[in-house]
Image (tube, helix red, strand yellow):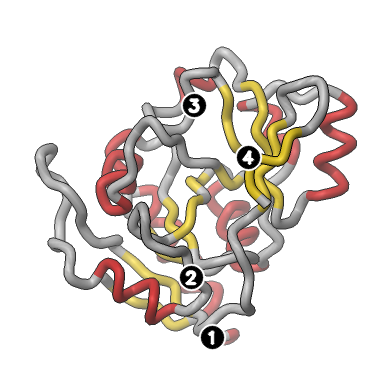
Amino acid sequence: MKVFKIKRQNLAPVIREIAKSIKRGKVVIFPTDTVYGICCDATNRKAVEKLFKIKKRPRSKPVPLFVKDIKMAKRFACINRSQEKFLKKVWPGKVTAILKAKPEAKKIFPEGIISPENKVGLRIPRHKLVNILLKELNRPLTGTSANISGKPASTKIKEVLDQFKNQPLTTFDAKSDGGQPDLVIDTGNLKNSRPSRVIDLTGKAPKILRE
């Protein structure tokens, strides 16, 4: 894992390098407004496959997406007026919204993004670095916590890295299980927080799936 320590004076060049790496299919640990997350280009099949192996996460449990704005969210999800009004109140922020995926979304994303019920999770985070990266890339990123499935998400960078450091270096073998992220954006320990609240907006009334 290559670690980038972010400082104000090196933010722009590091963002450019991270963006180039993501475009090449790399998997990156990065800070968010909740806990440390792990991301890749959500439209890149090999990158998404690698992320699932690193997290040891079953494909039956889709990962949500980070998008740069509601306009981008509307490209992938069906959003009516009342839903849009609600989203404008909670985004950017610590709320992942579960919405009905548009039919074309299944053509855009590989397995592991759209659920069997044809739903997709979306969020616009409130974090300067992530928002700059999303604008630089102009494409959706996976927006899931940086932890191995079954282990806790964390705001402490050492706890995050300790989960992955003893895993094998590569995950290109289709039979392999586990692996390490390619890059790490280290901004130190984050403020104490839990993962985002998850709200399903596909029913008659919003339903909280995770506080």
The residue singled out by tag 3 in the image is: 114
Residue drawn at point x = 67 percent, y = 56 percent: 125
Q: Is residue 65 above or below residue 22?
A: above
> Nearer the N terminus, badge 1 or badge 2?
1
Residue drawn at point x = 33 percent, y = 66 percent: 183
Residue at mark 3 to residue at mark 2: CA–CA distance: 25 Å
> Nearer the N terminus, badge 3 or badge 2?
3
> x, y percentage for residue 133?
56, 58
> Nearer the N terminus, badge 3 or badge 4?
3
| 98 left or right of 148 in image | right
Residue at mark 2 to residue at mark 4: CA–CA distance: 21 Å
At label 2, the amino acid type is Ser
Residue at mark 3 to residue at mark 4: CA–CA distance: 11 Å
**Mark 2, other Cα within 10 Å: few <14 / some 14–19 / many ≥20:** many
Q: Nearer the viewer, mark 3 or mark 2?
A: 2
> Nearer the N terminus, badge 2 or badge 4?
4
Residue drawn at point x = 85 percent, y = 44 percent: 88
At label 4, the amino acid type is Leu
- Mark number for residue 122? 4
Q: Nearer the viewer, mark 1 or mark 4?
A: 4
Q: Are marks 1 and 4 in contact (CB under 8 Å)?
A: no
> x, y percentage for residue 56?
28, 48
> x, y percentage for residue 120?
57, 30
Nearer-the-camera pick, 81 or 115: 115
The residue singled out by tag 2 in the image is: 154
Q: Are marks 2 and 4 in contact (CB under 8 Å)?
A: no
| 66 left or right of 5 in image | right
Q: Are marks 1 and 2 in contact (CB under 8 Å)?
A: no
At label 3, the amino acid type is Ile
The residue singled out by tag 1 in the image is: 7
> Nearer the N terminus, badge 3 or badge 1?
1
